[in-house]
Image: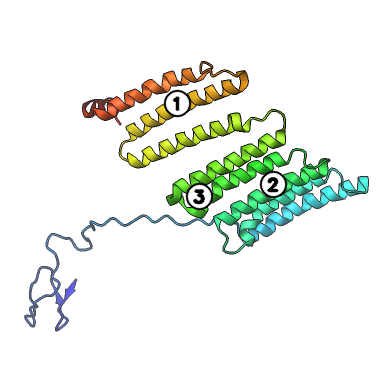
Amino acid sequence: MAYCVRCGVELQKGLETCPLCNTEVVLPDDNGIEEGMRPFSERIPRDVRPRVNLAPSRAFVILVTFIILVPLLITLIIDFSTNRTITWSFYPVTSLVLLWILIAYPSLLKGHTTFQVITMDILSIAVFLMSLDLYSGSFPEWSQYPALALLLIWVYIAIPILLTWKKIYLIAIIWCSGTAVFLFALDKLTGGRDWFLTLGLPVLVLVSLAAITIVVMAKKAKNKPLLITGVSLLTVSVLTIGIDALTNLFVHGKLLIAAWSPILAAVFIPAAVLLFIVNASPELKAYFIKKFHI
């Protein structure tokens, strides 16, 4: 209901001037809009998703601590009362400690970042595995392999967080370098016939070139998914043929490509050619869109 801005008298709907003082109504009611109704705004409000805090609360950490502490103490008491020393209980105790670290660390560290949590988790798992190897007998016997694998996983996960995806080429170089170091370390640790220079490094170079080709194509042709998919299939075909040839050269000493790669190439290459043709023909593209309801 409207009121006069001068004398304050209540105005009926549709009046343009006040019947008492003849003052013009500043905000006349809109014709055609019923009382209690408002026109719908053309601006759609943005649906803001609430942020979910994945870090456990302090109360939850305290509860988990007591839950883990009970079997830990029981295990130690049983082992010590039977053997007068710590023998088999070392394995479940260290496992429970690792579980507690993985759960409680994000809550204990205020202002933690994803990088810190990932680093702490991977470091804890690596130390856990190496402690098992150390307690089992001669050290190092086997723990160096999962430790190196965890280090490589850390490189894959942490480097994009530190550098952001805007520096994709620098990230790719670091990934390739880290993988090369990992393969070289495995070659030296396993002993026997050297395979890094003759097999590992060439395969890594092929995979890196294939990945770079796909990434560059995805950036150059953002609005052409058919072209990107076709180039990706063609690149994977060449990659499989190269890996097949290098593997046969390393194993048999002959450059053969008739083991398994032709089967994949026979599937991927025709599919890539079809995608290229469809991408170049608007009529054919419209036909497939209509037929497959894309």
User: Would you name the residue on which mark 1 appears?
Assistant: 238
Residue at (60% x, 29% y) in the render: 198
- Of 223 and 90, nearer the camera is 223
Left or right: 103, with 275 as reference point: right
Which residue is pictured at 61% across the width and 18% down the height? 252
Q: Which residue is mark 2?
A: 126
76, above or below 137, in the image: below
The kind of residue on which mark 2 rests is Ala
Q: Which residue is mark 3?
A: 160
Q: Quadrant of residue 47?
A: bottom left
Q: Nearer the viewer, residue 209 or 122?
A: 209
User: Splitting the image into 4 quarters, where does residue 177 fall?
Assistant: top right
Residue 176 point in image, percent of width and height: 53, 41
Residue 76, position as x, y percentages in the image: 84, 50
| Observer able to see residue 289 | no
Label 3 or label 2, whichever comes before in sequence order: 2
Of 42 and 99, the residue lying toward us: 99
Which kind of residue does numbered mark 1 sit on? Val
Judged left or right of residue 127, residue 17 is left
Q: Answer yes or no: is residue 132 visible.
A: yes
Going by the numbered disc 3, the residue's amino acid type is: Pro
| Above or below 51: residue 27 | below
Q: Tag 3: Cα neighbours inside 10 Å, few (<14), some, or many (≥20)?
A: some
Which numbered dot is residue 274? none
Determine crowd level at label 2: few under 14, some 14-19, many 20+ residues with C-alpha closer than 10 A: some
User: Disc 1 on helix, strand or loop?
Assistant: helix
The N terminus is located in which quarter? bottom left
Q: CA distance from mark 2 to mark 1?
A: 37 Å
Q: Earlier in the sequence, mark 2 or mark 1?
A: 2
